[in-house]
Image (cartoon, grey):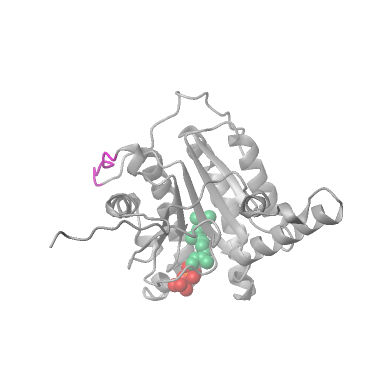
Amino acid sequence: MTDVQSSPRGSYAEPYPHPSGARAPQIPREFLPRHVAVVMDGNGRWANARGLPRTEGHKAGERSLLDVVAGAVELGVEHISAYAFSTENWKRSPDEVAFIMRFTKEVMERQLETMASWGVRIRWSGRRPRLWNSVIKVLERCEEATRDNDRCTLTMCMNYGGRAELADAAASIAREVAAGRLDPRKISEKTVQQHLYVPDAPDVDLFLRSGGEHRTSNFMIWQAAYAEMIYLPEAWPDVDRRHLWQAVEEFARRDRRYGGAIDAVKPA
Ligand code: FPP
């Protein structure tokens, strides 16, 4: 891995433009999602539909991820979290699991310098046990190399599961109580938030899933409690920054009430 210098704020490179010439829509900051969660689904089906092994779909997904990150940077989205490998994905064939582990390392090594130049801070979220040590090493190296970047945070969710994260938070809270450092009567939603893998990440505003399925698949179930859900019919390898921009435009039109209500009786 090459040595990467974090650029001081204000001197970041602009992402390469989209080949179609499409430009990011101008959306006022107050209508932008601060945090977009992305489920990169449909790689296997995309590949199989072309007579290729599933792993070719993952390979094709690298360009989509980089392009969506470029689009997030151009738009001014502060956080993007990508579901790269779930705690349930260990059920896949050993060959596919090994491929995703090796491929994720390669992608991060290959794209670190480019993303760092755009001002992207890279983080890892997920469970340590069982995840390949070599993957953790590469992700931690990316975290270290980009820790001062403050334009956009890309959280790579590897060996991540929403339920696993909440179970780990509960275990961590229980340890604090057992050690006498925490009064159980003071446990609140804020306490749970503080014990998540990336406690300082804001709630997910926009949850974007490719591949045509309409479910969360255990991704960020705490953080996305009030997220707007947008499902794309396209498989992940066919997704690019323009899909993100369209989703954000749709997000900006939605009415978010967070459980509140407005009495809007029409005059008789
Ligand atoms: C979901 O598609 C994809 C995954 C479980 C793996 C995600 C990994 C990538 C996008 C590879 C690229 C990785 C990086 C780091 C860019 P699926 O395999 O469930 O597809 P299917 O629903 O068609 O079977």
What is the chief secondary structure element of the magenta stretch? loop
Examine the rendered structure and indicate whether residue 96 appears above or below residue 176: below
Q: Quadrant of the N terminus?
A: top right
On the image, the x and y values in percent for residue 182 come to 79, 50
Q: Is residue 173 magenta?
A: no
Residue at x 61%, y 49% (from the top left corner): 124
Is residue 97 or residue 216 the one in the foreground? Answer: 216
Q: Which residues are magenta?
A: 20-27
Spot the residue most to the front: 268
Examine the rendered structure and indicate whether residue 57 appears above or below residue 21: below
Residue at x 47%, y 55% (from the top left corner): 37
Residue at x 61%, y 42% (from the top left corner): 142
170 on left or right of 234: right
Is residue 213 or residue 54 the one in the foreground? Answer: 213
On the image, the x and y values in percent for residue 16 come to 36, 38
Residue at x 41%, y 74% (from the top left corner): 45
Examine the rendered structure and indicate whether residue 40 appears above or below residue 65: below
